[in-house]
């Protein structure tokens, strides 16, 4: 008999009948041995079941660990892909922000240049108005001086020479009028 075809259980050992023969084995000792063998086979069978249960548990743990390892690897790959996508998105957004900032800066510079041109135009208009005002004032002052000189000339022929009129007391004559009178 080979081990594969011969399966011995504790019950088989307890029920096996050796038969009787003349001058055979001591029945009590055989029964005692059978009982010990049956107990040992029973103990070994229980131990084998316990070990098989542990082995099954270990196989389940190993399968779970492999699944976790696979899930972790997939998560790691996903995280790396996500990191790359986030980085690309951030770079695109950064470039967009830079373009927008440049466009805004160009708009601000353009507006400032327009304002400068506008202020320069207004300043030039004010300078022209000042010149025109001064020219009109000069013309008017020259006409007044001519009238004064004419009046003095006509008065000089009628009366003794007179002094230059001075402004009334408490009133100061503006300096620009002095410079106009001297011209």
Image (cartoon, rainbow, N blue to C red):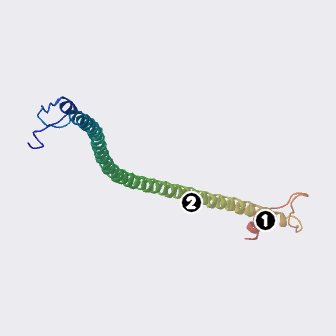
* Residue 158 as seen in the image, left or right of residue 18: right
Q: Position of residue 78 (x, y in %)?
A: 31, 48
Measure the C-alpha gap from mark 2 to mark 1.
Answer: 26 Å
120 up-or-down from 44: above or below: below
Tell me which numbered mark, 2 or 1, is placed earlier along the sequence: 2
Query: Where is residue 17, by image quadrant?
Result: top left
If the image is split into quadrants, where does the C terminus sit?
bottom right
79 up-or-down from 176: above or below: above
| Closest to the observer, 175 or 77 | 77
If the image is split into quadrants, where does the N terminus sit?
top left
Asked whether disc 2 touches disc 1, contact meaning CB atoms under 8 Å apart, the reply is: no
- Is residue 157 in view? no
The residue lying furthest to the bottom in this view is 183
Residue underneath mark 1: 175
Numbered label attached to residue 28:
none
Please tell me which residue is depicted at 76% across the width and 70% down the height of the picture. Answer: 182
Query: Where is residue 26, by image quadrant?
Result: top left
In this view, the mark in front (2 or 1): 2
Residue underneath mark 2: 124
Q: Secondary structure at mark 2?
A: helix
Q: Secondary structure at mark 1?
A: helix
Q: Estimate how packed mark 1 is, as few (under 14), some (14 to 19) or many (20 or more) residues with alpha carbons within 10 Å.
A: few
| Closest to the observer, 97 or 13 | 13
């Amino acid at each position: 008999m080979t081990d594969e075809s011969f399966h011995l259980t504790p019950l088989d050992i307890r029920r096996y009948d050796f038969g009787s023969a003349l001058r055979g084995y001591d029945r009590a000792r055989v029964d005692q041995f059978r009982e010990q063998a049956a107990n040992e086979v029973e103990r070994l069978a229980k131990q084998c079941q316990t070990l098989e249960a542990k082995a099954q548990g270990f196989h389940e743990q190993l399968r779970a660990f492999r699944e976790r390892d696979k899930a972790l690897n997939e998560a790691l790959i996903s995280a790396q892909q996500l990191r790359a996508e986030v980085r690309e998105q951030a770079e695109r957004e950064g470039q967009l922000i830079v373009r927008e900032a440049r466009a805004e800066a160009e708009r601000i510079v353009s507006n400032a240049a327009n304002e400068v041109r506008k202020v320069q135009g207004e300043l030039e208009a004010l300078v022209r108005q000042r010149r025109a005002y001064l020219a009109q004032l000069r013309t008017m002052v020259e006409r007044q001086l001519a009238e004064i000189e004419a009046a003095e000339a006509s008065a000089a022929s009628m009366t003794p020479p007179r002094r230059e009129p001075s402004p009334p007391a408490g009133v100061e004559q503006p300096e620009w009028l002095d410079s106009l009178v001297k011209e």
